[in-house]
Image: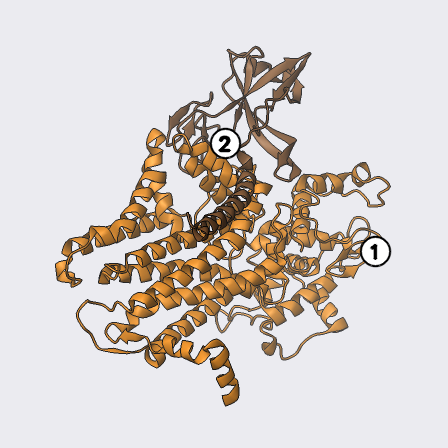
Chain colours: A brown, B orange
Amino acid sequence: MTTRRTFTFAAFGTALAGASSVSGAVLAFVLGPLRRRAAQEPVLLDLGPVAAFEALRAGAMQPEEILVERTVDDGYMTRRVKERFAIVGDARAASGLSALIMTCSHLGCGVSWDRGRNAFLCPCHGGVYGPDGAVLAGPPPRALSRLPVVVVGERVNLDTSALDA
Amino acid sequence: MRRLLEFLESRAALASLWRVFADEPISTRRAWLFTLGSAALVALLVQFASGFALALAYAPTPDHAWESVKAIQTRLPAGALVRGLHHWGASAMVLFVALHMARTFAFGAYRRPRELNWLVGLALLLLVLGFGFTGYLLPWDQKAYWATVVGTKVPAALPVVGVAASRLMAGGPAVGAATLTRFYALHVVLLPLLTVALVFVHLLLMRKHGHAGPTDEPDPREPFFPYQAARDGALALALGLALFWLAARHPAPLERLADPTDSSYVPRPEWYFLPLFQLLKFFKGPLEPIGTAVLPGISVLLLALVPWLDRGASRRPRDRRLVLAAGGVGAALLLGLLYFGNLDSPKGTSSGLDPASQPPPDARLLGGLASYERRGCASCHGSDGRPAPAPGPGASAGGAALLPLAARSHTLTGDAATLHVKEKSVKAPAEDEDGESPNKDIPSLLAYVEALGKYGPRFSALPQPIRAGGAAIDREDCRQCHQLYGEGGRRGPVLAHLLGKRDKDWLVAHFKEPKKLVEGSKMPSFKFLPDAELSAMSDYLLALP
């Protein structure tokens, strides 16, 4: 090994190490959003007295649409957001209820309940979901996602801890 | 001057550089087809200049993005023009890059030794589309928000890497503040840097291998300057004029503030993403990645491999029939998707400024408009100040034209005008229950007529809530206590910039019970007004700049 070659290797090596440390730091920052937050305690939002949801628990087909306002972490800030959920009867849940997230499983447009057709419709690409959130027609790959609804005392609560994971 | 030039030549070889640049031999055949690349470069410069200007006044946060774009569009000097240039310049970029590429393909100019430059050009096309996608979100209006929701969900269907890719694009689990800063950083920092670097390489490689010309047979050549430079300049001039015309006549759209709870909004992509959007509709359920990733991926890969797939000896079209046919089929498919995607688009709201996003006129003028209608002024003066011609010789002649100003030969002013209104009103208003003068609307009416004469009838296109709300605000004399467009009392808060601070529910509730929501408020309750009117008043207030 000549001195000149040693120098060349050393110079390039140092430059490479420097460049990769900076790139590594930047990359770690850019990839930050991949890290999910650790599982949390249930975050409960009060939806009202049990009596108000009696019909659904008894098996009524018409979902109850609710608008929930809550605070979410949004990047560098927290924001109050309004979100819509459909409360539906769910025999498997202890509370007899669960909440459908009204976001189409296809590409994330908002779905809405159509009384006439007895189905959730997505305006973007024509997805159709039944009253239980199962796909009836169109491109959606999955049923509407669910959030647990629990009864605490005599109040119905929505557990939003699964959102924003 | 001469000494300055000599100095520059000796220190920086500027004159020699210019000679190298200007004397490049260019084929004289099909010379106009070789101006497309420089037109794309001109469009890029327009984007850099207008983008710089926009960045001066833009705030990349969900709380202020829409408002700052609205201010650019409606209040800042030349803001609408600059934003229009940027909006239409984006389309021009895509158009000219695509045409430039089609020409290169048709002439087979990607052949040895220019394969690398074809790849650089393809990378530039993808960068341009990246600009389009990231720039789209920045105004944070309905279209921006929902198109980005869809756009960031597109990779989510991919196996293994899909969800991670989607999270990386959005900067989190959903489109929000982090998405906006990410897209902004990409749009104004990373993509421009990459673009400048690649354009430089593109030009350097072009000069290294010389001008390809339409065929590989020897063709007559002339220096770039002045012949080709003149053609490039002519196209640049035409492009510039077209952009200015478009920016002035068709302002860049700005829809309502993004509303994540709105489930009725159907996002429509910009025309250059329409083929991709249309493709999504053909592949459903588990097949979806075929439309979102496989087909676009294969297309880009095929384009990248073109120089190695087509390596015949001659560049003459008749020796490349298969390649040209394949390219033609590809282009036809793309245009077909574009055509059918466009057919499916809803008409109307897709272009132009959303009426609700323009600042509403002064409430007084809307009050005047309401009283113009209520008093039946239209039966003589026409609904927009232009009386209909008398239907026949026997019919009574209509009233004087209120529009345009030049037609008002005998302008009524002051007391005479008030008297005229009192006497001629078809339906004179009855005495108010609480003893207010039945004619207190006349000053507003006269202000409206004056504006009608000056500016023409431009209020009829306003959304009904804005008209009704403005009229109610005028009728209820909100200006007694509140400043509106710089006029009015100072006992209450100024009526401006309410959007983002208050929402409609709050305003309506506040109209009904002001003291309940604001402690120590002196504002009277407006419970007695119908809910529809309170809601319209809120709409008007929220639309105020």
Image location of residue B163, percent across then percent down: 46, 32
Frontmost of labels 2 and 1 is: 2
Q: Which residue is mark 1?
A: B490
Q: Which residue is mark 2?
A: A103
Residue drawn at the location 79% of the way across and 54% of the way down? B482
Image location of residue B257, percent across then percent down: 58, 47
From the viewer's side, name the closer residue of B293 and B306. B306
Hey, which quadrant is residue B325 in on the image?
Answer: bottom left
Would residue B398 be found to the left or right of residue B102 on screen?
right
Residue drawn at the location 69% of the way across and 74% of the way down? B412
The CA span between labels 2 and 1 is 46 Å
Secondary element under disc 2, as helix, strand or loop, is: loop
Q: Residues within 10 Å of mark 2 (few under 14, many from 20)?
A: many
Q: Would you place residue B361 above or below residue A104 in this image?
A: below
Would residue B449 be found to the left or right of residue B259 on screen?
right
From the viewer's side, name the closer residue of B455 and B155. B155
The chain letter under disc 1 is B
Q: Residues within 10 Å of mark 1 (few under 14, many from 20)?
A: few
